[in-house]
Image (cartoon, rainbow, N blue to C red):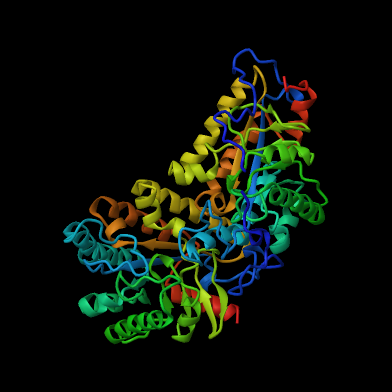
Amino acid sequence: MTLDPAYLEYAARGRGMDHGLYRYSSLFDRPPVDWPEGKTVAIACVVSLEWFPMVPEDKPFRAPGHMQTAYPDYRHYTAREYGTRVGFYRLLDAFDKAGVRASIATNGAIAERYPRIIEDIVAAGHEIVAHSTDMNGTIATGLPEEDEKALIARSLASLESASGTRPKGWLSIARSQSWNTPRLLAEAGLAYMCDWPNDELPYRMETGAGSIVNLPLNHELSDRQILNVQQQSADSYVEQIKDAYRWLAGEAQHHGGRMLPLHLTPYIVALPYRIAAFESLLAWLADQDGSWFATCGDVVDQWSAQNP
Amino acid sequence: MSEPQKSDPGLYDFQAYRGRPKIEWPEGKTCAVWVAPNLEFYEIDPPANPHRKSWAKPHPDVVGYGHRDHANRVGHWRMAEVMSKHGFPGSVSLSVALCDHIPEVVEDASQRGWEFFSHGIYNTRYSYGMDEAQERAIIEDSIRTVEAATGQRIRGWLAPALTHTPRTLDLIAEYGLDYTCDLYHDDQPTRVKVKSGKLTAIPYSLEVNDHYGFFIYNMSPREYADTLIRQYERLAEEGARSGTVMCIPLHSYLIGQPHRIGPFEEVLKHIAADGRAWIARAGEIVDAFNAQTGEDGR
């Protein structure tokens, strides 16, 4: 047996990253970031608010949480709708009670289908982050650039038309991008995206269309990962987030502001048997001296002002 | 023509756990504990190996690649600080191209007094399908690259992404490497049968590897910490009969996450305070074993 000799050639082997999207940087070597009023840990709650068409298209791939049975998959279609009709309102109430301003990563289809939800989000002062068109709007290399560009434009247009504000931030379905995505997002005028989980503070990416900030929305701390993929209990989830908070607050004493992103899914964390644990977590976080509940946009604004 | 595949790889002789000669660790310690951080570099757009795919998704696999990149930007620094604080040196399973890409991480490990062994060039280049000349090339590249970056001559090998060929162990022994981390048959070091030179299998671990803990067994951070403590307690107890080895293999993009590092620190505190642990580097453990065993490793 032998491999193609090219398999032992390493064209990108050299100083720095093996691509041009961003430069290497250690979190611990950067100038400290300050959050408002001397707060030390920014807590960014990001809710994915999604509509799953009952006919999946799988172009380029099927989104997590999408249909699973033969047509008609009433089971998954309605269980996801439960999150939107019921679970999301539990989360809105929980945020209100704990004084949380959150970022709602919203499919454009939600704005088109359920304008009432957009009104309730806007009235509560939450931020809307663009989250594709609907759950068939997945992105990966192979999706034609024109289609990807149109998908981004359609998502932004629906959300802007329903909310009156053009979103500044973007979250791709399953955080999945093509080689073109950062550039297309920058071209569309977006200030930041949440897809790359490689850091714990915002940083800038360079694209052919100018720079865009990446705000890392830690997928390991998401309700999907802990409750759904790893199948741990809501109490364990709460304990893990508290452990994360304690660690970050300790680190902030020496290294400046830290960020704890909580990625939430209404049909996962907002079920009746889980929501009380989550509410107790928000109350605990609100009680911590250093906690600052912020939208992703707030975090990016603060960071950008200190990192021009 | 490739060689016929063997049902028994013939790596070592059977030796029951009962009635073995006593292995003694320094100062009467019963369990040699070594921590093995994997310092890795994964390529964003690697060429395809016909025997194994690198990424689950079309490139760029943002979550797969980004998760691993967290190690070099965040996780390593957090993990290394905690290890140093409690007196644990690392024995590094190194993607040697990290020396070229991010020398900051390699220099940091070197300054902390950590030992380096090779984990291949990149964790996205696999040995499956290599011919002998190609395999020699990655071994020679590893020796050369680590020596240039750190001054250390590598003494050990953990196959890149655990991809082997039937000749790997013979080759690394021929190049004078002393230990392999790729065999999981024992809680004590074992001499490996090789064509030339002398090679020792040091217990590494899949079972208490953080990757297995979090993604095979789906443990919470505290459950994983408890698992490590139970593993240690048992091996330290049995080591009174004949010294045992416990390895804690880590990936800082996992253990260095903010919800995991706190419970992990409690494990290091526990082991450091216990008194039965010989906290050492891989090479020191292999040397101590070899100094008290004959040519056959007994």
Give percent across and percent down for residue B86: 67, 42
Q: Residue furthest top?
A: B19
Residue A195: percent from left, percent from top? 46, 69
- Location of the N terminus of chain B (image quadrant): top right
Q: How many marks?
A: 0
Residue A275's quadrant in the figure? bottom left
Residue A245 or B201: which is nearer the viewer? B201
Quarter of the view holding residue B192? top right
Q: Which residue is found at the position 65% from the left and 19% from the top?
A: B240
Q: Residue at x 30, y 56 (%)?
A: A268
Residue B156, image x, y percentages: 72, 41
- Front residue of this view, candidates A65 and B254: A65
| A27 left or right, relative to B278 | left
In the displayed structure, would residue A239 be above or below residue B195?
A: below
- Whether B12 is drawn above or below B162: the answer is above
Q: Is residue A46 left or right of residue B77?
A: left
Please report the residue visible at 42 percent of the width from the left and 72 percent of the height from the top: A295
Q: Position of residue B259 (x, y in %)?
A: 49, 52
Residue B157 shows up from this direction:
yes
Observer able to see residue B281: no
Q: Foreground: A8 or B198?
A: A8
Q: Is residue B111 left or right of residue A289?
A: right
From what the image shows, is residue A85 above or below residue B264? below
Quadrant holding the C terminus of chain B: top right
